Amino acid sequence: MSLTYIPDAATADTLQPISSPVEEIPIHVTKRLLGGTSALGISIFIERGAGFLANLLAARLGGASTFGGYSLAITTASNISTYAAGGIGSTAARFSGKYPQGSRDYSTLARALAIVSLISATIAAVSLWFGAAPIAHLLQKESLTGLLRWAALSAAGIVLLECARGFFVGQHHLRALVLLSTLVGIGMVSFVPIAAKMHSPIRMIVSQGSVTIAAVAICILFARPLGLYALGTNYVAELGPMLRQVWSFGFIQLAGLIGLNLAGWWLTTLVARADTTLVQMSFLAIANQLRNIVALAPSLLTESSYAVMADPESENSNTPQHVMALCTFGAMFASLLLASVGMVAIPWALRILYGHTYDMAAVATCIALAVAVIHMGNAPAAARLSIVSIRSTGVINTLWAIIVAIGGTVFLLHHGSAWKAMTIYLVGHILSSAMVLGVLYRKDFLPRGMVQTFLLGTVASATLAALAFLRASQERSAPMLTAIMALISVAALSFLFFMGKRHRWLPSTEVIKRAASKAFSRLQSLGRTCGGRAS
């Protein structure tokens, strides 16, 4: 009997569809979801906050050209690591939901993930080291060969970091998760800005790679005090079958991720080829940084809900659909709130945070924030589809890649710029999100109100991005357009709020208090633990 449950288009129809309005999520599922979100939130806040600060300081201290070179190297390393690892982070989270600590297959899963991640990290590093020269030639910037070779260290670190984070998230290992994030965050803030001040992209990329690898190694070294060992069982399952399950799921994901990352890398290549100074690359990097900040809070719900939706015990109920609907509303509301504030204030925010050099990045950043709303608002549905029908997910990812690649070739081949690249991403995400919802609707796995929620967020964010473009090109009308953007934001969020209230997606006061109390108790427990070890 196979231990991995990956239903496809042929088997998905045997699952129970949803045909009723969204009901209350069972209390044990709510606790699990809130616990995962609070644990992930603490760690992500530490890591992403420190990482954002490190990049902000690097952009100011190093200048647009130096930061652009570093951003290009990081983007390349991320793409190579994705090909080598095949979505190791989501794979680790998914199987952790199926084999939690205390189950007899827990230790076998940990060993399998360690083997897969080490092999994948080696492949990523070797591939980028020997592929640096051809990539630099493709970019028409042979001088970047050395920088790209040193990015091999970062590629390996990204693979190991994603696997460790996915495993800790899926298993709800709060202490390990916080330690990992703290080490990465402190390391980035301590070393990357200093290297940027020396105007050395190579030192920046080496610092980033060394920090990630060292953080994972320290967590492994302290595995026992962090509570990562198996509990209450001496049973060890055969490693071979578990490795096959992990590899097979990773390869299925890789089939879709190859197209996604090739398309993204093609857009980056087109921008870099047309940008002799790499200033546009720095604009693209800043837009993605701020997009990631907006996506931070919504991603907590998506990542923590993945293990819940993948639990085979819930497949005979409507719980996965309830979780998907609740997380979709929460992710859409949070991302639209943050993105709308960002779009209204971005001209002043860029000047304050990064300096006058980056004023021209405003349009690209606003479009990137719209992408964050659409992407994160659809992320729970996309995660659910990867469980219901991994084949459909692969097809949609491939279509997204084709759309983005064709759009990039047509619009960026001779005149590449950050804002054009982000516009292509925006169109691609709108179309792919519509396809995800369409497949779930056809399979009758789409709760009521999901489509309306997605449409509201999409229309509002796209409208705000269009107005931001007009504001940048018509300076005399900027105050009036900013006021209109603020009014549209308030109206869209109000409509979304009442929609959530109608479908009972708004958490009750009791649930909010429980979540806050749980997060606070986790912090206290973590503080006592750290204090005890220090003494």
Image: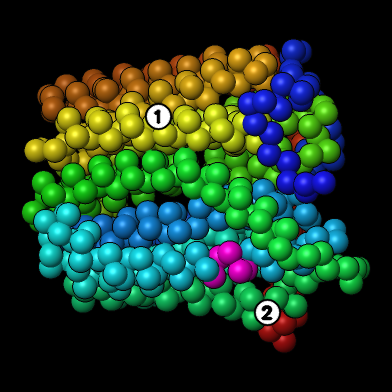
In this image, 504 relative to 185: left or right? right
Query: Of residues 2 and 161, which is closer to you in this image?
Result: 2
The residue drawn where x is 89% and y is 72% is 234
Q: Secondary structure at mark 2?
A: loop
**As displayed, is residue 4 above or below residue 220?**
above
Q: Position of residue 436 (x, y in %)?
A: 52, 25
In this image, 280 relative to 428: left or right? left
Magenta stretch: dominant SS?
helix
Discs 2/1, front: 1
Mark 2 or mark 1: which comes first in sequence? Answer: 2
Amino acid bearing label 2: Phe
Q: Position of residue 131 (x, y in %)?
A: 28, 64
The residue drawn where x is 85% and y is 61% is 104
Amino acid bearing label 1: Leu
User: Label 1: which residue?
Assistant: 399
Is residue 177 visible to us here? no
Neighbour tally class for label 2: few under 14, some 14-19, many 20 plus, Cα within 10 Å: few
Image quarter where the C terminus lies is bottom right
Q: Position of residue 93 (x, y in %)?
A: 65, 52
The image's colour scheme reads rainbow
User: Label 2: which residue?
Assistant: 222
Determine the residue located farthest toward the bottom in the rendered image.
535
Q: Is residue 316 rendered magenta in the image?
A: no
Neighbour tally class for label 1: few under 14, some 14-19, many 20 plus, Cα within 10 Å: some
Magenta stretch bounds = 114-118
Q: Position of residue 244 (x, y in %)?
A: 66, 56
In this image, 190 relative to 182: left or right? left
Query: Of residues 492 and 127, which is closer to you in this image?
Result: 127
The residue drawn where x is 74% and y is 13% is 19
Q: Secondary structure at mark 1?
A: helix
**As displayed, is residue 150 above or below residue 131?**
below
Q: How many marks?
A: 2
